[in-house]
């Protein structure tokens, strides 16, 4: 998620917070490659280990992930939307 946010800011041309480490001109291509690789890796984690699996051998992680997503959305709609207070930001706006 953090690489995606930095990549989006770089693509939009927004100013980034100064840091101790920078990739220079190679930063944007490395970030784009990282995001693409992570999206591919995320999708591949839900595939079964072999073609034509029986129910015993199916990769059930997609079911667990789907349950967590549905539970999180319902929980936010029912409780979080009214009660959640975001974090306080202690960042100087001088940059």
Image (tube, rainbow, N blue to C red):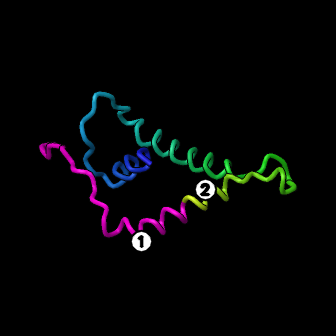
Residue 36 image position (x, y, % from top left): 55, 48
> Neighbour class for label 2 at 10 Å: few (<14), some, many (≥20)?
few
Give whichever of discs 1 and 2 has the lower sequence position. 2
Residue position marked by numbered label 2 in the rendering: 65
> Where is the C terminus found, in terms of image quarters?
top left
- The magenta segment: 69-95
CA gap, disc 1 and disc 2: 20 Å
Q: Is residue 53 above or below residue 18?
A: below
Residue at x 67% of width, y 48% of height = 45
Residue 55 in the figure: left or right of residue 92: right
Number of residue marks: 2
Task: Looking at this view, name the residue that lies furthest to the left.
Answer: 94
At horizontal 43% and vertical 49% (from top left) the residue drawn is: 4
Above or below — where is 76 with respect to 17?
Answer: below
Whether residue 42 is in magenta: the answer is no
The residue lying toward the viewer, choosing from 8 and 43, is 43
State the residue position of label 1: 78
Q: Residues within 10 Å of mark 1 (few under 14, many from 20)?
A: few
Instruction: Place residue 75 in its image quadrant.
Output: bottom left
């Amino acid at each position: 998620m953090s690489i995606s946010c930095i990549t989006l800011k770089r693509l939009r041309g927004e100013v980034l917070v100064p840091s101790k480490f920078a990739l220079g001109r190679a930063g944007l291509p490395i970030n784009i490659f990282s995001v693409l690789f992570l999206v591919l890796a995320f999708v591949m984690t839900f595939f079964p280990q072999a073609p034509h699996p029986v129910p015993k051998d199916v990769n059930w992680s997609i079911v667990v992930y789907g349950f967590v997503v549905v539970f999180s959305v319902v929980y936010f709609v029912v409780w979080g939307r009214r009660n959640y207070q975001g974090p306080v930001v202690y960042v100087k706006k001088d940059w």
